[in-house]
Image (spheres, rainbow, N blue to C red):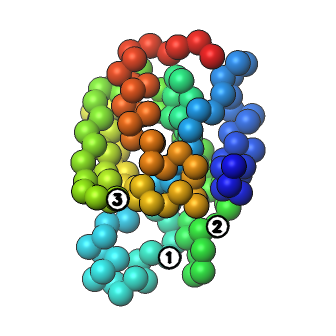
């Protein structure tokens, strides 16, 4: 387990229900590649980065930020999305640059990006989207 995985597990431990465990971690961001290119890389610094974790019944998102030299292990807030609140998930992207649009039943759409090669930030990076789609597609939480 990477130091970032350990950080996510430690931050989320108090939020897990009895018997609920983290199945997979991921590293998501909301920065657009176009914006990064246009800003000469300066837009990489700051907010828009998230540690994410999947349990069999919900997705947790821990807001963090990128420093000048590296990703910070800082919890700027935790959000959760119950799979029963998700209307649809639309994965897209090419090669290692992926995107997921999560449409919620309340009408909001959340868009996250991930790089499947960024496994140094989260051990589940390569399987994150596929696992999320499977959990949501299961329709109801499965027991641990």
Q: 77 and 90: which one is in front?
A: 90
Labels 2 and 3: the sequence-earlier one: 2
| Residue 70 placement: quadrant | bottom right
| Residue 127 placement: quadrant | top left
Above or below 51: residue 35: below
- 103 left or right, relative to 25: left
Labels 1 and 2: the sequence-earlier one: 1
Above or below 90: residue 39: below
Which tag is nearer the camera, tag 2 or tag 3? 3
- 115 left or right, relative to 88: right
- Which residue lies at the image location 29% right of the left edge and 26% below the top edge? 87
Q: Is residue 11 visible?
A: no
Per the model, the C-alpha gap separating discs 2 and 3 is 23 Å
Query: Which residue is label 3 attached to?
Result: 96
Query: Which residue is label 2 attached to?
Result: 72
- Which residue lies at the image location 49% right of the left edge and 61% below the top edge? 118
Per the model, the C-alpha gap separating discs 3 and 1 is 21 Å
Query: Which residue is label 1 attached to?
Result: 45
- Which residue lies at the image location 30% right of the left edge and 74% below the top edge? 35
- Which residue lies at the image location 47% right of the left edge and 33% below the top edge? 81
Residue 144 picture location, percent across and down: 63, 16
Which tag is nearer the camera, tag 3 or tag 1? 3
């Amino acid at each position: 387990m990477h130091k970032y995985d350990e950080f996510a597990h430690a931050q989320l431990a108090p939020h897990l229900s009895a018997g609920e465990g983290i199945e997979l971690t991921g590293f998501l961001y909301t920065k657009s590649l176009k914006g990064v290119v246009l800003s000469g890389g300066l837009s990489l610094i700051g907010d828009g980065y998230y540690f994410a974790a999947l349990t069999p019944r919900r997705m947790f998102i821990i807001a963090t930020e990128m420093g000048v030299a590296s990703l910070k292990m800082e919890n700027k807030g935790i959000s959760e999305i119950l799979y029963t609140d998700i209307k649809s998930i639309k994965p897209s992207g090419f090669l290692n640059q992926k995107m997921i649009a999560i449409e919620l039943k309340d009408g909001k759409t959340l868009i996250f990006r991930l790089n499947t090669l960024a496994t140094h930030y989260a051990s589940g990076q390569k399987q994150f989207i596929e696992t999320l789609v499977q959990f949501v597609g299961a329709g109801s939480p499965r027991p641990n």
